[in-house]
Image: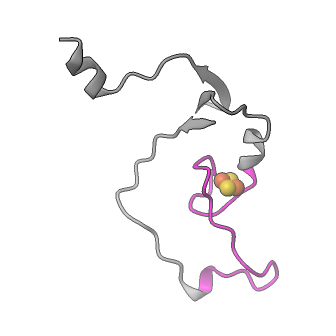
Amino acid sequence: MTRLVELEATGPRKLDPEDIDDEKGNVAICQCGLSDDFPFCDGSHRKTSDEEEGTTYVYEDGERKVVEEVVTEDDTDENE
Ligand code: FES
């Protein structure tokens, strides 16, 4: 399973003690890249629960699509 995620951040966000929710306890940090509240988990990872091993997905505008072929810049250089 592979997931294409486009992120615009250029550095990490550090957690401050005030980021810890006194009522909920620990804060979950998103590792799937789909959270609308990144870097915090908002439950969006549930969209990935039925992803299949060996398949690449892209999530755009709330929709999930299967990527048939991934072409990297290195791939295109080889074909020139
Ligand atoms: S791990 Fe990404 S939204 Fe939960």
Residue 54 in percent (x, y) is at 63, 29
Screen quadrant of the C terminus: top left
Residue 32 in percent (x, y) is at 62, 50
For the stretch drawn in magenta, the main secondary structure is loop
- Relative to 12, residue 78 above or below: above
Residue 73 in percent (x, y) is at 28, 27
**Residue 46 shown left or right of residue 65 in the figure:** right
**Residue 16 shown left or right of residue 27 in the figure:** left
Q: Which residues are magenta?
A: 18-44
| Nearer-the-camera pick, 24 or 72 | 72
| Nearer-the-camera pick, 46 or 68 | 68
Residue 48 picture quarter: top right
- Relative to 73, residue 7 above or below: below
What residue is rendered at 49% in x and 18% in y? Answer: 69
Screen quadrant of the N terminus: top right
| Nearer-the-camera pick, 59 or 70 | 70
What residue is rendered at 75% in x and 54% in y? Answer: 43
What residue is rendered at 79% in x and 35% in y? Answer: 50
**Residue 75 shown left or right of residue 34 in the figure:** left
- Relative to 33, residue 75 above or below: above
Residue 67 picture quarter: top right
Residue 8 in percent (x, y) is at 40, 48
For the rendered model, the colour scheme is one colour
Q: Residue furthest left?
A: 80
Image region (quadrant) for ligand 1: bottom right
